[in-house]
Image (cartoon, rainbow, N blue to C red):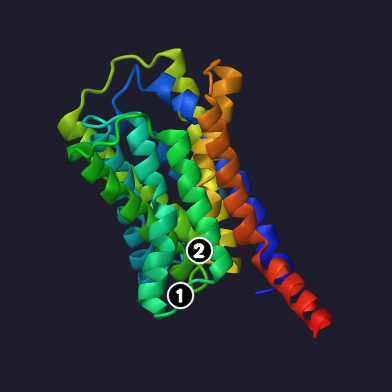
Amino acid sequence: MTKMKQLQADLALLAVTVVWGATFVVVQDALSGIGPYFFTGIRFAIAFALLGLIYFRRLANLDRATLRAGCLIGVILFAGYAFQTVGLKYTTASNAGFITGLAVVLVPVFTSLITKQLPAPAVLLGVTGATLGLALLSLGDNLSVNYGDVLTFFCAVSYAGHILLVGRYAPRHDPVLLAILQIGTVAVISLLFGLCLETLPAQFSKPVWQGLIITAIPATALAFLIQNSVQRYTSPTHAAIIFITEPVFAAATAWLVAGEVLTTRQWVGCLLILAGMLVAELKDYLFNVTKIKQARET
């Protein structure tokens, strides 16, 4: 893994995160006219159909191992969406945003348990700074834990698992097929839940159509295709720290588009998240600078 490849991968993942953060306002408007499971199912079904049409020749290379890996990643990804959706019924959006972002802490913890090695000090510093920033950005004055918080924590576990699984299987399998399979899996399970728990509206409103188009293509088809293609060139911990910037871009979009006002504390939180990402991203440079200074002193 060359440093240039890793930098390019991290920048691509950052671009994906910008898109995800920018869609929060769109999704919020769309959900006023359709249930979350149907919205997610149709969104992922459109993305699945689009990628299937573009890369249908790749399907000839599908084998059992790739099918198993793609479906497993898709199930874990759906679990993240499901736990978050149900959890939001019992907790505040700020608590949900913070707890979901704890995936950035869980990824290096899980990685350490698997590899039996502690992350680099700069990575730990970056994770700590980003988590503190996320708390300042997302949490309100009420810090109590409730049933929804517990469900949302399992969402964070699921998202951390998704990042780790993509990091594990993307180098071994065709990333395009992995993206298509996981998107298709989420679509099927979401639509099944929608049929059981929701009522499909007779007519889609304009915000619903806009939300489906915007989220299905750039925020699903392209986003997961990029993630599966480039995450092989970076570490799961790097990816997690980059993904934690999503609420920063969501807050910035809400400020620019919806006119939401951020407090000073929230702006400080945004800066801490970005600083944490930069510390983790520049760990090798900082380490080399320290070594050069030590060599000069001796």
- Classify mark 1: residues with Cα within 10 Å, few (<14), some (14-19) or many (20+): few
Instruction: Identify the image quadrant of residue 166.
Output: bottom left
Q: Which mark is residue 124?
A: 2
Indicate the quadrant containing the N terminus: top left, top right, bottom left or bottom right: bottom right
| N-term mark: 2 or 1 | 1
Q: Position of residue 190 (x, y in %)?
A: 28, 40
| Residue in the image at 29% along x and 44% along y | 188
* Tag 2: amino acid: Leu
| Residue in the image at 58% along x and 29% along y | 252
Q: Position of residue 161 (x, y in %)?
A: 36, 60
Residue 265 visible, this angle: yes
| Residue in the image at 49% along x and 33% along y | 215
Q: Which residue is mark 1?
A: 118
Instruction: Identify the image quadrant of residue 268.
Output: top right
User: Is residue 255 found left or right of 2 in the rendered image?
Assistant: left
Q: Position of residue 45 (x, y in %)?
A: 39, 40
Residue 240 visible, this angle: no
**In the image, residue 127 above or below residue 169:** above
Indicate the quadrant containing the C terminus: top left, top right, bottom left or bottom right: bottom right
Q: Are marks 2 and 1 in contact (CB under 8 Å)?
A: yes
